[in-house]
Image: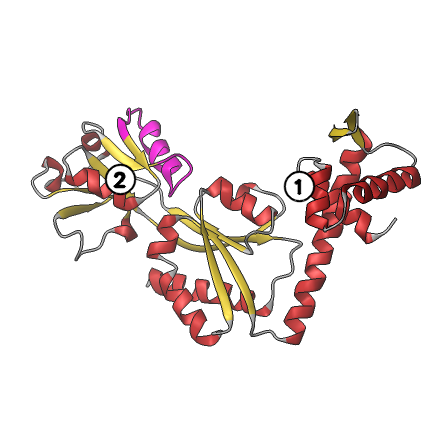
Amino acid sequence: MNLNQIELLRILQETNFSLSKAAEKMHIVQSAVSRQLQLFEIEIGSPLFERHGKKLTGLTPLGARIMEEVATINNAKKNIQSMAADYLDSNRGTLLIATTHTQAKYFLPTPIQRFREKYPSVSIYMIQASPEQLIDQLHSRKADIAICTEKVDEVADLVFKKCYDWHHAAVIPQTHPLSEGEITLERLAKFPILTYSRGYTGRSNIENAFKNTGLELDIILSASDTDIIKTYVRLGMGVGLIAGMTYDPLSDQDLVMRDLSHLIPSSSTKIAYLKHNYLPLYSQHFIDELLVAAKEKAL
C-alpha cells in the first residue's frame, strides 16, 4: 500500500469510479490504473468496488469504510501542504471565501479592504452560493471559510463563530398604506410579500414570526438577491421583507423602510470552517477582521 494508491482511490470516487478519467487526472495510462487498483485489492484481500464487466459501478461495504479513511488521509495531506507553505511565507497564499450575495455586498467590503492592506500578497477568491452549498464548499475544500446566516451551526464537523446580529425591515413605496402608522404583523399579512428564498437571509425567522401568531404569509415572490426584491417592490407588487442592513438611504430614497426588529426575531451571521482543516495565519487574521467589523457594525 502506498500514497499513490490512496490517491487513486480518492480520484476514482471523485470521478464517479471512471478508470479513464482517473488515468487522465493522474497522467498515467488506464491499464496502470487498473493494475494499481488490482494490487491494492490483493493486499487488502477483498474487492473495494462493485463491477459490471470491467466497469466500476460502486463501492462494496468495505470499500465505503475505506473511503472514509482515504478522506482523512487526503485531509492530512492537504493540511501538511498548508502548514509548510504557511511556515515558509505566512504573508502569501490564497484565501477562499464562500458566502451569500447579501454578505458579499453589504458586510464583506470593509473587512476585505482592511485585510488586503495588511496582506497584499494574498489572493482572495469569493464563491457566492446558497447556505447548503456553502457547507459543501467547505467539505470539498473549495472554500476555507464560509459566512452565512442559516444552516451553519447544524453541521457537527464545523467550527462556527458568531459574527453579528441583524434585523429585518419592510420596504415599500412612499405612497404605500404601511408607510405611516404603527407597523404590525397583522397589517403586514394583509399585503402580498416579497422576500428571500428559503434558506437565505433569515427567511425561517420571518416565517416563524407569522406562524407563531397564527397569521398566513402570502409570499408571491422569493429571491436570494435583495436588489431583485427591491426592484419588484418598486413595481408595486407588494411589501419587501429584507435585511435592514441592505437598505441604502441614498440609492433607496424612493422607498420607505420600516423597522421590524420588534416583530421578527434577530438573525445571526456566522463564520464557519472545518474543525480538522489547518488555517494559515492570514486566514486567522481575516477572521479577526470580520469580528472587528462586526463589532463596529453593532455600535
Determine if residue 270 is in view. no
Q: Label 2: which residue?
A: 241
Q: Quadrant of residue 65?
A: top right
What's the magenta region? 197-220
User: What is the x, y in percent for residue 9?
Assistant: 76, 43
User: What is the x, y in percent for residue 168?
Assistant: 29, 44
Q: Residues within 10 Å of mark 2 (few under 14, many from 20)?
A: many
Say which amino acid is labelled 1. Glu
Q: Residue furthest left?
A: 175
User: What is the x, y in percent for residue 155?
Assistant: 58, 42
Say which amino acid is labelled 2. Leu
Q: Residue at x 32, y 37 (%)?
A: 223
Q: Residue at x 47, y 74 (%)?
A: 120
Q: Is residue 114 left or right of residue 185?
A: right
Q: Quadrant of residue 67?
A: top right
Q: Residue at x 67, y 54 (%)?
A: 276
User: What is the x, y in percent for residue 63?
Assistant: 79, 35
> Considering only vertical position in the picture, is 23 above or below 18?
below
Q: What kind of element bears circle 2?
A: strand
Q: Quadrant of the C terminus?
A: bottom left
Q: Residues within 10 Å of mark 1 (few under 14, many from 20)?
A: few
Is 134 magenta? The answer is no
Q: Label 1: which residue?
A: 14
